[in-house]
Each structure stands twice: as C-alpha cells, then as structure tokens.
Image: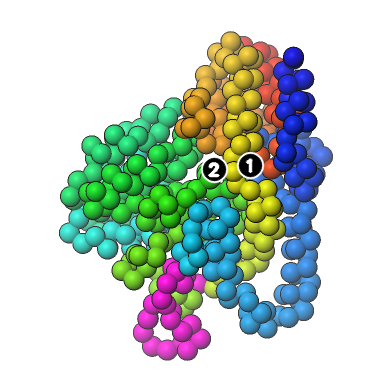
Amino acid sequence: MSLLDRAAALDAADPLASYRDRFLPAPSVVSYLDGNSLGRPLAATADLMDDFVRDQWGGRLIQGWTDGWLEWPLTLGDRLGAIALGAAPGQTVVADSTTVLLYKLARAAVDARPGRRKVVLDTDNFPTDRYVLEGIAAERGLALHWIETDPVTGIEPAQVAEAVDADTALVLFSHVAYRSGWLADVPEINRIAHEAGALTLWDLCHSAGSVPIALDEWGVDLAVGCSYKYLNGGPGAPAFAYLRHSLQDSLRQPIQGWMGHRASFEMGPGYEAATGIRALLSGTPPILAMVPAHANLDMLAAAGIEAVRAKSLLLTGFVLELADEWLVPLGVEVVSPRSAERRGGHVTLRRPGFEQLLEPLWAAGVIPDYRRPDGLRIGPAPLSTSFTEVYQGLAVLRDLVEKHQ
C-alpha cells in the first residue's frame, strides 16, 4: 500500500471524519497543520456570532447582562471542566488571557506558602510562563530554581524530585511541552511536589481539547490554558483557570476588580472577595469573545475527548511515518517523542534553514507552525484535519527540502 493509499484508508476508517464538514472552508489552504497554534472556525460559530450581535447584543442591549451574560465565566467554565478537563463544577472559570491568569494563580500560590522562597520551573517552558514567574520572583523576593530540560523531550519526575524541598512554594510546568509535544507525567510530578509541601500549577494550553485531562483525579492544585488552539475559540479568545475546591478559601488572587467582589453591584467601599471560583474574576467578562465557546464545547462533547485523542495519536503517528520515509533521509530530525504514551498533539521537525521554507510553503497552501531557531511544528487538529491533508502537506515540504538541499 502506498502512503497515499494508506492516508485514504485511514480517512475511510475515521469515525470522526464527518466533523471536518463543521468547519468553515479555506479555499486557498491545501493543508492546515497549525491547529496547535490557532484552531479553525466552525460554521456554527459564525452563525452564533451573527445571532449574538444582531439579536442578543443588538436586541437586548444592556438587558443582556440579566439574561445570563454575567454567569458565562462560571457556566462555561463548568462545561469546559466537565468536557475537557476532568474537573467537577465550581473549579473552572473562563476569563482574561493565559498570561493574566498565570499571574493571578502563581502570585496567589506563592503568597499561600509564606516562608517558602523557591519556585521550580523548567528552561524550555513557553516564554510567558517563564516571564511571569520572573516578575513574581522579583516582586516577592523569591528564588527561581531552573530545571534544564531536553527540548527533544520534557520535564521528568526524577528532575522534579531532585529540585523540590521544604523551601519550595510552587512548581510550574506544561502538561504538553510547546516545543517538542512531550506529555508530562502530571500525577507523579504532583505527588512529588505535594510530598515536599509545594503547590502545583500546570499550563494546559497545548493539551486542552486534544489530550484527556483529569485535574481532580490527578490532584492538580491550579491550572491555566487558552481556548484558541484545539478549542477553536478564535484569535485572542479568553483563557481559563482551574483552582481546586480545597484551596479556594485560602488563596487570594492579587488583581482585585469589581467582578471578583462578593457583591459586584453594591459598588461599596473596600474589597471583599467573592466566595468560590468567582473570586478569580477581576474585570468585566469578555462576553463577545466567549460566544464561540458554546459551539466548540457542543462539538467536543459530541465527539468525546477519548475519540479525539485516539485520532490525534493516529495523525501524529502518520506524521512520524511520513517523516521517516521522506524527510529523515534528507537531513530532517524528529525532535518529538515517538512513544504514544509521552506524545501530545503535535510533532516537531528540525533542520537548519526551515525558516526560508515558510514563504514557499504558504504559497503552496501548506501552513505549519515555525519555532526558532529551526523547528517546524506539525499540529493536525483531530476534528478538522484529514490524513490525506497531512500527506499533501508533508509531500510539499519534502519537495521543498529536496529543492533546497
């Protein structure tokens, strides 16, 4: 069987194939391989946005706040928690950006461990995570303990065990490493951190909507993530935060705004935090930007995260198969886990000079993701990507690499 025939056979056997029809077409795109950076829009999202602008916003105007808008951060958070995060109600909120929520949770966490001066993180985590913790360390007089991680893999439990001690307040890692796609062992790292008395904060940006997550079962303390990748929320879509029930009375986030007040519309003197997860809110919720979440969560609930994960592993496995057959002989290196147990939703390929191939790739309708200094991330979103699309995209990449040898 040729690789093209294999792609066709995988498409024919794909139980999620019909979901591709739910997305708006992009006529100039032959192969979209960047779902791990920005998901494609649903046709239902366009309909919902039009209805919201014309009927809800345009028709109800300010009365919409009493129609339920004010509760969206919590109701959508609960839906997201149930469908994608393994979180019981009352622990997830949709608000702000990933950066702002990271700051809120990390500041609250270190303040909840007074006397502990150490924060543990890794050198290859996403820049925002590192930058936010650098700022908090400067604000609070903390010391950052950097774990050197192999960019080809990611954080290992043994490394965490060597780093944490009785002085550690917080550890922060990504569930799926943004560069390599390494899938961290969250339960084991949590166990190690908790034995030392530290809190754990997980970045779920590259796993939410692609990889099954069980925050409650794994004993996660805090987590954040974005909704514009595998959750298809659109550019700049609001992020989400998770704070487990047992910590909600003791952690206080530092950005005190009116929406996190116990009685927002009393507008009285002095700040009194709301109870529960609502206390993570600060300003007015980004209601218009939340509209796509309704359609996206409906779709993910119908498909099921386990089925999404099964297809994701087949897609990335096919990427590895094509890379080994076509690209490795041309000097391209696979710098992502080959083990399905440790592989997230994308595969990174590395070769000097890849940046020069971006323009011709885009001109040919092939859109991967590039990460300096020389990595191409291939991120096929399971609900919007076919195996034939992966074949077509990597075939163009192969031809360009051959041409630029």
Label 1 Cα neighbours within 10 Å, binned few <14 / some 14-19 / many ≥20: some
Q: Which residue is mark 2?
A: 211
Quadrant of the frame with the N terminus = top right
Q: Dot 1: what SS?
A: helix
Q: Is residue 49 left or right of residue 100?
A: right
State which tag comes first along the sequence, 1 or 2.
2
User: Does residue 273 belong to the magenta stretch?
Assistant: yes
Point 73% across, 57% down: residue: 45
Quadrant where the image shows the C terminus: top right
Residue 253: give x, y in percent of width and height.
Answer: 37, 67
Check disc 2 and give the amino acid type.
Answer: Val
Q: Amino acid at mark 1?
A: Ala
- On the rendered structure, is 151 left or right of 191? right
* Residue 307: numbered disc: 1
Which residue is rendered at x = 54% and y = 43% of the image?
211
Residue range corresponding to the magenta coloring: 261-283
Does 223 sit above or below residue 337?
Answer: below
